Image: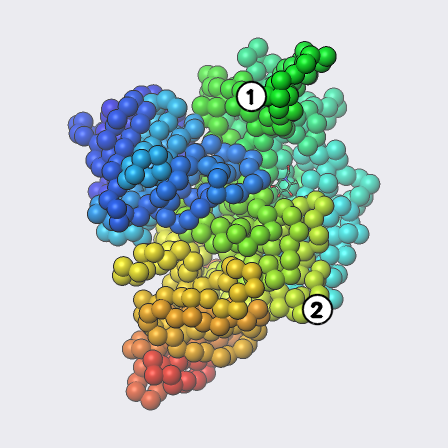
Amino acid sequence: MRVYEINDHIKKYSFGEVFQTDTVVIKGKEIKEQPLEFLKKTLNNQFLYILDDEDIVYGLGENVRGINKRGWIYESFCTDEFSHLPNKKSLYGAHNFLIVYGKETFGIFLDYPGRAIFDVDYSKRNELKITTEDDNLDIYIIKGKNLNNIVQNFRNLIGESYVPPKWAFGYQQCRWSYKNEEEVEEVLDNFKANNIPIDCIYLDIDYMEDFKDFTVNKKNFPNFKSFIEKMKKKGVRLIPIIDAGVKIEEGYDVYEEGIKNKYFCVDENNNPFVAAVWPGVVHFPDFLNKDARLWFGKKYKYLIDQGIEGFWNDMNEPAIFYSKKGLEKAFKKIEEAKGKNLGIYDFFDIKDTFPRLANSMEDYRSFYHNVDGTLVRHDKVHNLYGYNMTRAASEGFDYIDDNKRFLLFSRASMIGMHRYGGIWTGDNTSSFEHLELNMKMMPSLNMCGFMYIGADTAGFGDNTTDDLAIRWSQFSIFTPLFRNHSALGTRRQEPYAFDGKATEIIKNSIEIRYALIPYIYSEFMKATINNDMYFKPMTFEYNDSFVNRIEDQLIVGDSIMIAPIYKQNAKGRYIYLPEEMLLWKAKKYHSEEFEIINKGHSYIDVAIDEIPIFIRKDKILVLEKPAENIDSMKNNEINIVAFLDKESEYKLYDDDGKSKDYKKGKYNEINIKVINKNNDIEVKIDVKGNTSINKINVTAITLDGKRILKEVILN
Ligand code: MIG
């Protein structure tokens, strides 16, 4: 074991020959060997920590179950898993960061690209056990003043999170698939006819020609470039999907260049590995090979040159429907069984032969990456694949225009990828349980550095219901990525696809999202720049013994707390407040009924058209009049609501929304202070940089329920 001091808060313990994942951005210096803190190494590839009964274990990013991960066993092995049930151990991401909170409080980060198992108080009471496939790994122990600070220290270690363009905070509509120009335009026209704001429409796999990356189906999109332009004029951007597998087809340039330059993963015999996904048989680009990565990344230019400004990367676990070898074996097995008198277990085995072909470990063990000249077996570095596909895209974008922000998110991910793109949480189903899961995943993902995140709103698989679409939209208005998406064959679930009342409520929710943009963008950017979280469990801000148990109320940014409705037919819910808060049951962006809710347990009524938003004490919520899309928002007059005890303060961040200049400190900030002066308020404004905002309408509600209004003109 080698020990490194990264800084005052972090130590790295290095075992064996560590594969460089490029996740960590600070090297640190080697110090003399000292025992691993907190954890005990029980076997070569196993670490143990004994939890106290009251300890909470946070982290593990995109995963099933609760915010507190105790009581289950999780696996980091990026998986194309469409069933997000609590019996699953692994979804699309590999997010090896945990925080133990309680008797001892510290963070653990496992920098390891292979399969890792986190047994959190599952197999044996109070044991937190981390097991890896081999003992080549780095373990980081991260300390800090408190939970937030541990996350900050960890995020500092892994580098700054990806930031999308500002328009990516608008509402986005997806479906598998809008098949041609007419259909895409019809979707937009429906939004316009119903006056529902929208910023993006997605193109799923059918826009391609035979599912070939970087091609466009000429029959369905005959004038792709001018169509993109036309749609942009009408106010939306089109976001195409890119899949990991490259179709094997003579004459297809991506295939031929890949073959010529040896840019594909290879099998044991050094021939390009053959698997099947949507295009039929494919090769997988070797994203771990830096030349192949840059080559693939530059391919995005084909679509960018036609006006595309954002992408979603799919199937990059990589998902495998079957491999050539696997299929041959399966046929052989069936052939051999023919004519035999099969026992029933043999029959079941035969019956499952084909389903078992998908995403099999045998296949993941049978192909290789070329990492700087060395062949590395895929399963040992599996979790790096989606990460590096997204890195490829990002490196390609930088090559094309290194100061432009593109929209980019991925299905598979590992920590490290957070610097290159966001993630959507994959194929959930249209159930209230998955809305609940969505809510619980968000803070866990923020801990791991993923900031631009969101789930398929209203649910991907199965048929949604209008009340689920409403409740889910009412939650998703707070997620940075707010996208409604549904699977092939399911009922339509665009906001206008429901009866008039449901459509109206969803429309109002989307308008509230746009009204919240100044706040959401400001909080997202500040959190990203400062390595803070945008979504936080209550425990990260309050400390009492009941707060620790809450998993269905979240702090969103600095000023508000939300208590989503995630049960069908619920007309309200129980909440717990660690201090008094101002409740806004938002129905319309300009509705202004506020109510002070006292500290402690309460039940609040929440009608189907209401979104409960709680403004914290001495904090400020910022709103603006919505518009048909982000680019049309005027950004000159804002409304603020202060829940005022002594003094409410807010720092409103904004920037150009499209360049990376914010990294050089080019952004503007308006510091707003509302001070309680008995029966009046004083408002202090301090502007840094150039702002287009010239008027602030202040509503202050004091602790004793007084409402004080003021208009402030900026010059
Ligand atoms: O095997 O492109 O998660 O969002 O609509 C399914 C079709 C492939 C999976 C993605 C989903 C997308 C779908 N894709």
The percent position of residue 32, horizontal first and vertical second, equals: 17, 27
Q: Is residue 543 left or right of residue 660?
A: left
Look at mark 1 in the image and give the residue it sits on: 363
Label 1: how many residues lie within 10 Å, few (<14), some (14-19) or many (20+)? many
Front one among 697 and 142? 142
Asked if disc 2 is less than 8 Å from ligand 1, the answer is no
The residue under the point 62% across, 24% down is 348
| Left or right placement of residue 138 versus residue 434 in this view | left
Q: Nearer the viewer, residue 688 or 648?
A: 648
Q: Please give the name of the residue rendered at 49% of the width and 68% of the height, measured from the top-left corner.
A: 572
Residue tagged 2: 500
| Mark sitting earlier along the chain (2/1) | 1
- Whole-percent x and y of residue 22? 41, 32
Asked if disc 2 and disc 1 are in contact, CB closer than 8 Å, the reply is no
Mark 2, residues whose alpha carbon is within 10 Å: few (<14), some, or many (≥20)?
Answer: few
The kind of residue on which mark 2 rests is Gly
Residue at mark 2 to residue at mark 1: CA–CA distance: 50 Å
Residue 508 x %, y %: 60, 69
**Colour pattern:** rainbow
Identify which residue, 113 or 296, lies in the foreground. 113
Q: Is residue 416 above or below residue 182?
A: above
At horizontal 40% and vertical 80% (from top left) the residue drawn is 700
Q: Which picture quadrant has residue 263?
A: top right
Ligand 1 lies in which image quarter? top right
Secondary structure of the residue carrying tag 1 is helix
